[in-house]
Image (cartoon, grey):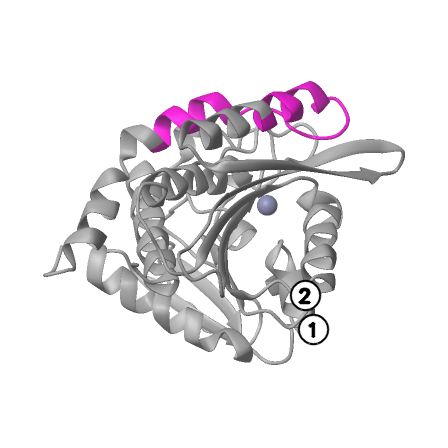
Amino acid sequence: MKRVDPLLRQIVETISESGVRTHLERLVGPRDPFGGHAGMEAAADVIAEAFRGFALQLVEERFRCEGRWYRNLIASRLGSFRNGQVLVVAHYDTVPNSPGADDNASGVAGLLEVAGALACHRFKHDLVFIAFALEEYGNPGSLYYVEQAKACGAPIVGVFDLEMIGYTGPTQTAPPGIQAPAAGDFIGVVGNRRSEGLVSLFKGAAALVTPSLPVQAFVVEGNGENLPLVRQSDHAPFWDAGYPAVMITDTAFLRNPHYHLPTDTLDTLNLRFLWQVAAATAASAALLAGFA
Ligand SMILES: [Zn+2]
């Protein structure tokens, strides 16, 4: 690590590969609203318990979808100035018949490590950590949250959406017309014009605390309407509501051959990579929230 602020260094050093592994071992398994419903509820309990263990204030936001109740888990730590909110989010559901290690136990494991590392520091802005339900089914969880946030004028200054952050591979593909490196060893950070500052912040933070982590930034026009795959996660409702948000991703099916399959298992993940992404995210969120 380069010469960095001692508080930032402390945060990054709190995050560990073994912490990531422990979360993953408790989360990986079917977590869909059908055959995996019990697994989804168990995962929500694991996440809630972890948030409570960090002494964060926890709210379980319940919403109804097709006749059943689901819950977003919202953990927060109030800032000293109360004039802004920094969000770190990840979805915890899966598609049917997939244990969802990369999609998206990896994002949730990163979220929990980031929350644990930031929970014991004081910031100017509020920190809000959210595990969303049902991202795989049209994002009703994050849509519901954003609707409430917008209605009450929540002062969200930035959202970091962890969407598959645990897979690296020898090859990388890209949609037509998009340039990408040949090797699938980078983390992608995807923003729209309004979120360009967040994209740069993440790149800068990663260069500072995890200099060996390759980062590829991608800024889309509008809200990504011309490239639907860049909208496929919980950051899209925030974009649509006018909030700055970035998706942090290993690029999903453009790289990971196990995407949405029974083979999306823990042993396919690169935990060192996941650890680096979590560290860079924690540093980004800390810098945006501002030490108090
Ligand atoms: Zn996902």
Q: Residue at x 44, y 63 (%)?
A: 189
- Indicate the quadrant containing the N terminus: top left, top right, bottom left or bottom right: bottom left
Q: In this rendering, does residue 258 appear at all? A: no
Q: Is residue 91 left or right of residue 287?
A: right
> Few, some or many C-alpha atoms within 10 Å of disc 2 (few <14, some 14-19, many ≥20)?
few
x then y, percent, for residue 114: 38, 44
Q: Nearer the viewer, residue 9 or 33?
A: 9
- Indicate the quadrant containing the C terminus: top left, top right, bottom left or bottom right: bottom left
Looking at the image, the residue that sits furthest to the left is 3
Looking at the image, the residue that sits furthest to the right is 67
Q: Which residue range is magenta in the image? A: 20-44
Measured Cα–Cα span from mark 2 to mark 1: 6 Å
Which label number is shown at residue 104? none
Q: Which SS class for mark 1?
A: loop
Residue 21, quarter of the rendered image: top left
- Give the residue pinned by disc 2: 228
Amino acid type, label 1: Glu
Amino acid type, label 2: Pro
- Give the residue pinned by disc 1: 225
Q: Residue at x 46, y 76 (%)?
A: 196
